[in-house]
Image (cartoon, coloured by chain):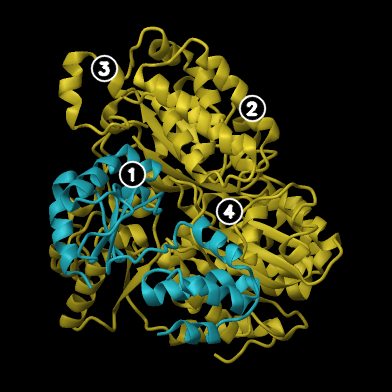
Amino acid sequence: MDIEKILKESGTSQKDLVPLLHKIQAAYGHVPPESIAAVAKHLHLSESEVFGVLSFNRFFTLAPKGKVRVTVCQGTACHVRGGGRIVEEMEKKLGIPAGQTTADKKLSLEKAYCLGCCAIGPVVVVNGTHYSLVSPQKVDSILEKAKTAE
Amino acid sequence: MRKLSHPDHLAEWKRIIQEERPAYQKVIAVSSGTCGRARGSLQILETLTQEIERRKLSDTVGVEATGCHGFCEMEPNIVISPEGLFYKKLEAKDIPAIVERTILKNKLIPSLVYEDPATGRKYPRQREIPFYQKQMRLLTENNYRINPERIEDYIVLDGYQALAKALFDMTSESVIAEVKASGLRGRGEAGFLTGKKWELCREAHGHPKTIVCDADEGDPGAYMSRGLLEANPHSLIEGMIIGAYSVGASEGFICVRTEYPLAVKHVTLALEQARKHGLLGAAIFGSEFHFDIQVVQVAGAFVSGDETSLIAAIEGRKAFPRQQPPFPAQQGLWGKPTNIHNVETWANVPVVLNKGAEWYAKIGSDKSPGTKIFNLGGRINNTGLAEVPLGTRLRKLIFDIGGGIKNNRALKAVQTGGPCGGCIPAGKIDIPLDYDTLSQAGSILGCGGIIVMDEETCMVDAARYSLNSSSEESCGKCVPCRVGTKQMLEILNRITRGQGEALDITRLENLAAVMKAASLCGLGQLAPNPVLTTLRYFRNEYDAHIREKRCPALVCQGLLPEKKKAKNTRRPETGRKAI
């Protein structure tokens, strides 16, 4: 899927910006920095406006992400139940800080502030699959499964 | 069923659905919201379906995936109708026995029945379980009767009748009068009178007017919007159409967080079905009223909770709030009058019209009528979603419905309203939960998050955690919030590390006063609440940290006695079982 095709299918007003960025991120796994100029031109915005929205919303990312996205919830309820330890454990096992991607570009580790599953925390999501009541002991098996995830 | 082009078609459609429905002797509803799925409900659903097919019972036993039933602690769970039996914490291996014994022979399986940990009494029926029995479920009662992917289930439960009534038996003004008379208030942070807001929007100049449903639930520890969107999306859609008719809007938006994929899926599907049947789009019910709704996926910023910043997000700008007035009801999306409510408020609208304002106004307290869904979380036995009349005492919610504190510890405080809410001390447990009383106690009702803290929680650390959340979420537009949250957080960080100074408390109070007075939106104005309430009710803990360099709850790592320190090394830096 190339940028031009995505742009063609999208509207041209400012309100189409966020849906457009969603589409680009869905196609590439991130928003390639070189697409900003094309998006700005298509929507008749300045590049700085596009960049502003892009960097304001934490869902979007400019850096390429791995195919496997591991998200650890850090909301209040998960924090109470030790969500912080899960992140630490994952960082240690993967050797990268949260927010980054492993050297082989396969797996990205992310933090989220409340995924809305507070009763069953700490929660970890791997490419849309939820793991509940995660303990540091379970981290290994989750990462093992994550490596084989699509 | 073809498009509905007359209100009478609704009753006819309901009759047809009822006739065409398979005559099941039993229906098994599997709670399959996001939490349920995370606990394996889809596997339960699959195994159940296979087992029913294997035994050739498909004609007599129905299996449905429903939204969340509210009792998240007991996921995955099922409700078997018509008896209303409740089986909890299921595993795939339990399924053959359920079909064999309960479905075929009408016998209970005691090990799967809910048992009250306090009394040891078993409650086979859902409605008798104290968690459910003591609630008043106006909005959530139907959750286990509805497959959210089918509009027919909502129609059978008299769905869209309030809309038909509004469109054909009432004028826009009389709908507004009815909603005003009911006393319904916004279920968000401000608690503004819904009918009054509609009136403002209707009277405002400008066209086209818009309706927005704020389902960008960024408040950590609250997921009632997700629960409603996933379980009963048509209820809020119906509420929005009625609202649009009242204020004269032609376009609507539902803003859902990208983090809620299942909610996005269900609400998108529900909109398509409503459109297909003529309940949305051009000429609704064959009338002259046209209105349509789009789903907008917001990309994750808590500040979008403010109405003006949500507007900016929909317009494709950075989600910055702006000065009010003019209020969004006067100048909102693209400068036109816009009416914004959250999911729960919209879902209340059909209830008001169906039951009547007089009936509705009698529920709850005088100034806060109706029910409210609360999110029970933290150190409480029964976590989940509980719906009770406003004005219900906190004690009832925590002990009667919530089953008390985990491991029988002592209650210390309850944080209401998320990171912008305050901490109510255990001594005020008899406080009625309504907008005004909570605000007098220094907290807010907010969207209904309830985080229970026990004796092992350090209140300074709890305030620090909330401030950390607020400082990360601050959009940075106005100085009092951007700098204030950061400075407060740094002072609290210092205090919890054992480097607090006597002057710090005055500094915190001064910062809080400036932020409350000068911040642009609710986030900055309310962010000091956790600090102010903990200072008000738990001043001694601050003193212990600052003067005695001691953390009474033994949470703050920098202040632990040497022996404890060694013991606590496996615990997270941010607090042992804190909050």
- Residue A82 quadrant: top left
Q: Nearer the viewer, mark 1 or mark 4?
A: 4
Q: CA distance from mark 3 to mark 4?
A: 39 Å
- Label 3 with label 4: CB-CB less than 8 Å: no
Figure colour of chain B: yellow
Residue B504 position, x and y percent, is 51, 16
Residue in the foreground of this view, choosing between B300 and B394: B300
Three-letter code, disc 3? Leu
Separation of residues labelled 2 and 1 (CA atoms): 29 Å
Circle 2 residues within 10 Å: few <14, some 14–19, many ≥20: few
**Closer-to-camera residue (B527/B221):** B527
Residue B259's place in the image compared with B507, above or below, is below
Mark 1: secondary structure: helix
The secondary structure type at the circle numbered 3 is loop
Tell which subunit mark 1 falls on: A
Q: Which residue is mark 3?
A: B560
Residue picked out by circle 4: B304
* Chain that bears disc 2: B
Per the image, the residue denoted by label 1 is A78
Marked residue nearer the N-terminal end (3 or 4)? 4
Chain A representation colour: cyan
**Is the residue at mark 1 from the same chain as the one at mark 3?**
no
**Looking at the image, is mark 3 or mark 2 nearer the viewer?**
3
Where B71 sits versus B487, above or below?
below
Q: CA distance from mark 3 to mark 2?
A: 35 Å
